[in-house]
Amino acid sequence: MGSFIVRVLINGLALWIASWLLPGMDISTSATTGAVANAGITQGSDTLGVILAYLFIGLIFGVVNALVRPLVKLLSLPVTILTLGLFTIIINAAMLYLTSWLSSYTPVHLTIDTFFWTAILAAIIISIISLVAGRIPGAGKR
């Protein structure tokens, strides 16, 4: 269970960095800003809301990667072998796009403007960050 929480934190961090680097990727909430402003909520809680939004999308992304990605990788194995593994980037982008679609049914939305380039670059960025963060001692599986 602790490993899954660490994976969600890493996914949230990777999604934040990808959305910071790529202008076509954004995470937003459907909460009305007027109600938040009228409630007297300060800037600090707005930052907490943004952090929770990224963690929520990281959770959705983790569930998609845990449940859907193995099946897609198995079904696309011949194409992956034929492209010498480069099709894995397309699979990662598709999982990101599936996360975007699933998040459209939640209060927190991941939006990607164009599937091909933004999702491909985001998939590469997220993969690199996950690879580096997975190598940190204590972040890996026990």
Image (cartoon, rainbow, N blue to C red):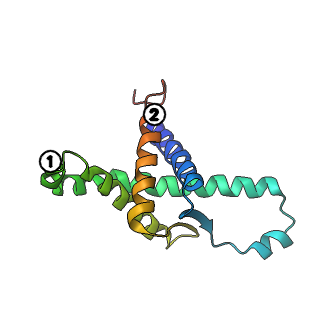
- Residue type at mark 1? Ile
Q: Position of residue 66 (x, y in %)?
A: 34, 50
Q: Is residue 109 above or below residue 90?
A: below
> In what quadrant of the picture does the N terminus appear?
top left
- Residue type at mark 2? Val
Q: Is residue 87 above or below residue 3?
A: below
Residue for point 36% across, 52% down: 65
Res 96 visible? no
Q: Position of residue 104 (x, y in %)?
A: 50, 72
Residue 81 numbered mark, or none: 1
Residue for point 56% across, 52% down: 21
Residue for point 58% across, 63% down: 27
Identify the residue under disc 2. Answer: 132
3 and 103: which is toward the camera: 103
Q: Residue 116: which quarter of the image?
A: bottom left
Q: Position of residue 121 (x, y in %)?
A: 43, 54
Res 131 visible? yes
For the residues labelled 1 and 2, the Cα–Cα distance comes to: 25 Å
Q: Earlier in the sequence, mark 1 or mark 2?
A: 1
Q: Position of residue 39 (x, y in %)?
A: 84, 69
**87 lies left or right of 125:** left
Q: Residue 13: which quarter of the image?
A: top right
